Image (tube, rainbow, N blue to C red):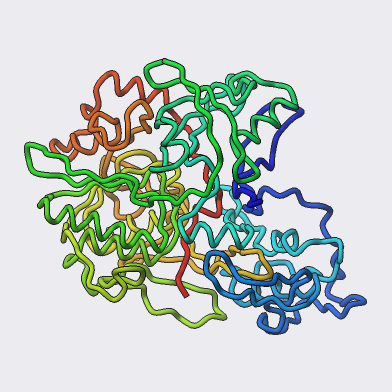
Amino acid sequence: MKKFQYAINGMALSALALVLSACGGGNSQVLGPKPADTGGNGDNNGWVAGVYRDADTFKNLCEAPRSGRSQFTNLTFPDKRGTRTDEKNFLRAWTNETYLWFDEVTDRSPTIDSQTPQDYFLLLKTNRTTSSGAPKDNFHFYEPTEDAEAWEAGISYDYGFRLKVYSSTPPRRYFIAYVEPGSPAATAGVQRGDRIMKIDSYDLVTEESNAGLMALNEGLFPSELGAAHNFELQAVDGSSKMVSLQAGQIESKTVLHSSVIDTDSGKVGYLVFNSHVEKSQDEWVTVISQFKFAEVSDLIVDLRYNGGGLLSIASLASFMIAGTNVQDKVFYEQIQNSKQPRLEPFPFLDEGLYGLNKNVALPSLHLNRVFILSSESTCSASEAIINGLRGANVEVFLIGATTCGKPYGFYPEDNCGTTYYTIQLKGANAKGFGEYSDGFIPSNSDNGTTRVKGCSVEDDLNHQLGDSSEAMLATALRFRATGNCASAVTRSQQKTQAEFNNGELILPDTRKIMVLDR
């Protein structure tokens, strides 16, 4: 049976706390003892520190070769019979060739049989820190290739709801952030803002037994397709409801919602954009075409739950926002390590690359400003939209919370059934700015770098996405009309902001990245 891309890696049973994280993100794996390096003198298997062969020499040489085809790409697996050391030699050479800070990586022996390729990969990064003491590279991940391909196809394996957690220790507070249309959760009547109270016979709010925590984790993130669990939910109005959910294959809608909002000063387009994958292009084309027909005069793009994805989609979406205002301008300057050739700047793409609109001119609203809703889950390719548009002198207003701060790009590398993510480039906009590792901050004024004019507003789970009373959207509409943040939400909405403060959307770290098309 298909295993799920979400799982619990860090259940702190000794602390009797329910701790959620995503599998596949290698930073959450438990590492064994570090291998003993030979100090550069070689070992019995011929390894010599600082001496590398071409990565292609070891590519697709696998300890356990796969057979057949990918269910998502229909491509035959390229695996050949090899060894565990071959897999690690590939990672070692590939890192040395492409990693942005390759000269800061300690060269370690790949010949220790007890060490998996995945554990070895986790060591292949810089250990230096920033001026604040934070790790310089905090974005070093891997996951099963099957999960990577499923995400690229817009497929997940679950109930079809996304969680936002405000406390993972008793009394726990787990809420539904949004629901995928047509999913088991949607069919059962699960809604944004519902709080999960119980799963099967276990109380999610207060449970402290080891057996209970294990059962709750399995209920939230089932390990197999078809698994069924009973949920007791508390709706926004305080009422209780019982639903039975069966895990399935969910096809995500990356533009989750779109609508046209009538205001006294014209029509405003609003869209919720949750992931940068290939199918997003055609979904954007459909929505932008509808907005053009409706003659919207402004646009609000809700990126609060968008962890990133393909840079090409960020570029296409940005063109569809700004059109002639960014035509033939630089969207993203790609900076690689000193071993790699200089790349041509990434432009604002005005023709489709994928699906039904491949090689077709894209529609655009030709706007010179845009309002973006953000949160700490707004990452990578989503931040590239903010940075790229500002670099081309399109005015961006930021409503919400400080973004997550990931100005780096990846070429995901599939080898022997695992997809590896290592930082291979950083980027800058047309004005040369790209250092936003602490995120973009909604501020009273715009300083051209990390501070973006706008308003700080917390997520509001008491209202559905697209409801003009929802705090972020209400603030954006009021700010558009008056330029004022302070009066943008009502007293009841301010209470909502206090209730839903500092929540975390449960999303794997491998979904908070910027992926570069080869």
Q: What is the total number of numbered labels drawn onto the structure image?
A: 0
Give the image quarter of residue 469: top left
Residue at (30, 60) in percent of width and height: 317
User: Residue 89 appears in which quarter of the rendering?
Assistant: bottom right
Residue lying at 73% horizontally and 81% vertically, measured from the top left: 52
Where is residue 15? Give x, y as percent. Answer: 72, 26
Q: Position of residue 328 (x, y in %)?
A: 23, 74
On the image, which quarter does residue 390 sit in? Answer: bottom left
Q: Is residue 49 above or below residue 242?
A: below
Residue closer to the observer: 60 or 69: 69
For image coordinates 66% across by 66% down, the residue present is: 417
Left or right side of 303 for 109? right
Please give left or right for residue 192 compared with residue 243 in the image. left
Residue 374 drawn above or below residue 318: above
* Residue at position x 48%, y 34% in the image: 164
The residue furthest right is 44
Image x and y of residue 352, in percent: 30, 71
